[in-house]
Amino acid sequence: RKSDPITLNLQRAFIVIYLWQDVLMDRIDRWSMGKNIDTEYLPVWYGDRLGLRISGLMGFGTEFMLLAICSWTNHIPLYFILNFVVMNGIWIGSILYRRLILSPNIPRKD
């Protein structure tokens, strides 16, 4: 709060635009973990390499690469299809991986 006004306004804008995504992903993670996860093993959950790789595909880099390739090849309608199908498929795959594969391998509290 001691920063310059431009930085504070950019931070507020970032929160308005992206906070809902952070809240949604936190809820999805909690659902994926299931009940009674031992908090001692949260670093294992958040440090899972395959989970991180799958989640990493959902970033701006993948988004911009799809857009760039489709723009260069003049296939913008294909971009929208790939964006909707592939990116949502990656998102659903990430959730299913965490819920069905990763979650059963994390120790539970008794």
Image (spheres, helix red, strand yellow):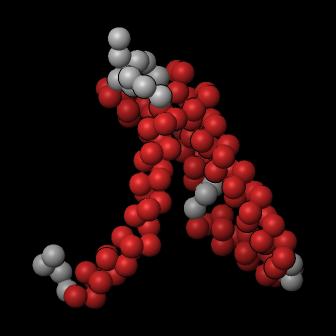
Indicate whether 52 appears above or below 7: above
Indicate whether 61 appears above or below 34: below
Indicate whether 16 appears above or below 41: below
Residue shown at 63% from the left, 55% from the top: 57
Q: Position of residue 37 (x, y in %)?
A: 39, 25
Residue shown at 35% from the left, 11% from the top: 110
Left or right for 15, reference 60: left
Give the image quarter of residue 20: bottom left
Front-most of residues 19 and 102: 19
Q: Position of residue 103 (x, y in %)?
A: 52, 27
Q: Quadrant of the N terminus?
A: bottom left
Front-most of residues 35 and 3: 35
Residue shown at 43% from the left, 57% from the top: 22
Give the image quarter of residue 45: top left
Left or right for 107, reference 12: right
Q: Position of residue 44 (x, y in %)?
A: 43, 31
Residue shown at 79% from the left, 72% from the top: 79
Q: Position of residue 90 (x, y in %)?
A: 68, 50
Left or right for 30, reference 95: left
Residue sitting at the far left: 2
Left or right for 96, reference 73: left
- How many numbered discs? 0
Would residue 102 be visible to someone looking at this image? yes
Would residue 47 be visible to someone looking at this image? no
